[in-house]
Image (tube, helix red, strand yellow):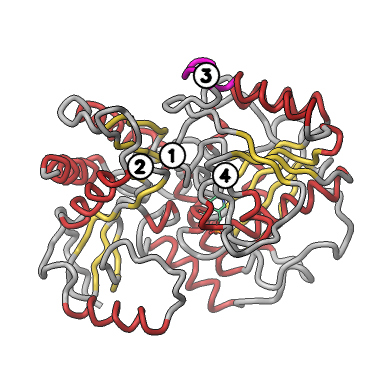
Amino acid sequence: MTTLPKPRQPLLRTALPGPKTAEIMARDQQHLSTSYMRPYPFVPDHGEGVWLTDVDGNTMLDFFAGIAVSTTGHAHPHVVKAVGEQMTRFTHVCLTDYPQEITTSLAERLVAHIERPGEKWRVFFGNSGAEAVEAAVKLARNHTGRTHIISTLGSFHGRTYGAITLTGSKTKYKRGFGPLLPNVSHVPYPNPFRPPLGSTSETCGQAVLDHIELLFQTVIPADEVAAFIIEPMQGEGGYIVPPADFLPQLRELCDRHGILLIFDEVQAGMGRTGKMFSFQHFDVQPDIVTLAKGIASGLPISAMLARESVMTWPVGSHGSTFGGNPVAAAAAHATLDLLEGVEKHPGCGESLMENAREVGTYILAELRKMQSDFPFLGDVRGEGLFIGLEFVGPDGSPDGKLRDRASLEVFRRGLLNLDCGEAVIRISPPLILTREEAATGLQIMREALAAL
Ligand SMILES: Cc1ncc(COP(=O)(O)O)c(C=O)c1O
């Protein structure tokens, strides 16, 4: 196979959608689930690094990484090699019944990033983020003997029954699907840009904590609450970073009431924010952590990590046929090699985590500069390559229509992007994005915003 020269700019050979794209999209509409969304006319054919080429030969710069999944970009040689080698050894045996060195060592590597001195953690492997969340909630109930779970508004935890119940971002995920899981409540997320409960950006964390205590006095007996689940940085809800003191104080509140603290790191975890887990930007340690998306560069695997003292469910009480399958585990090892810097990626410094931090800081600074030219960019926020761009109307309210137009203008110029929240574009590229490639994406964004 010939290696194509690495493109430095998007290359649009046809009008979008091209003829093959249009033809496949028409077939897709005929045969696939009516629930799938199709925000843009794009049908991938192959990818290399941060570039994806569609079936008509149009090459786009990928600023969304399949929703924060393609950590090492597309077809990374180190990942391809690891997957290929494992495929030639064995593809499946079933981790629920037999140990496999590749998953044992993966668990050892994951807990090494979380364990503090004197702590021991264990890992349960699944296939998707929702499965990791289900496992976390089942474990929390089983361990505590309590039933109630508290989640946050704006959250997204997945599409299975437990996970949609916990999700607090949009009613469309729940409409027509009830009855859902009983004993689940939602409290506001401390969003400094849109502070809830009449608070300010400085006081929003305390306001949410006070609100929880109020619920404990009035409607939810605290001693019936098994767990509080929260995204330490909220993804689907708008790429929101909470105030620095909020999570440590939430930890204290949970400890006071014997409640387990679950951090859902499915979207913000695995190096994306410049640290392995987004909660590590704050001085806080949870009881349970859920991981998926970026863990294996696109192969399906998820993990639920819990303190040993919490993972007390009995033998046979939980399992999965495919969970922790060895091919996905091989991809996860290769992804970790690059994240940790055991394997170097050219042009990305010592590790992909470091690269995410540096390139993310650069993008954030450049986008903040753009705010003076484009007053409708109400907020630019994030950490590392987990960046949200909120569009506002003249009165400061979220402007989802403007965001949709902006997102399409950006796409038309060859930059793949994705919305989130009410009026936010998320920037979640592969962590191999170089500064030069970031500059290309920023230039496209500037042109698209100027065209609005
Ligand atoms: C924070 C978070 N948790 C859970 C999920 C569900 O993951 P999956 O779609 O793999 O089930 C998502 C997906 O977007 C997510 O962002």
| Picture quadrant where residue 229 is located | top right
> Would you say residue 201 sits in the magenta stretch?
yes
Dot 4 alpha-carbon crowd within 10 angstroms: few under 14, some 14 to 19, many 20 or more: many
Give the label, 4 or 2, closer to the camera: 2
- Where ligand 1 lies, by quadrant? bottom right
Is the residue at mark 4 in contact range of ligand 1, meaning its CB lies under 8 Å from it?
yes
| 204 relative position to 13: left or right | right
User: Which span of residues is magenta-colored?
Assistant: 198-205
Which residue is tagged 4?
Answer: 265
Who comes first in sequence, dot 4 or dot 2? 4
Q: Please, is residue 386 above or below residue 318 in the view?
A: above
Residue at image mark 3: 199
Contact, mark 1 vs mark 2 (Cβ under 8 Å): yes
Residue labelled with disc 2: 424
Asked if marks 2 and 3 touch (Cβ < 8 Å), the reply is no
Dot 2 falls on a residue whose secondary structure is: strand
Residue 137 locus on image (x, y percent) = 74, 50
Q: Which residue is mark 1?
A: 239
Residue at the spot 40% in from the left edge and 54% down from the top edge: 72
Tag 1 and tag 3, C-beta contact below 8 Å: no
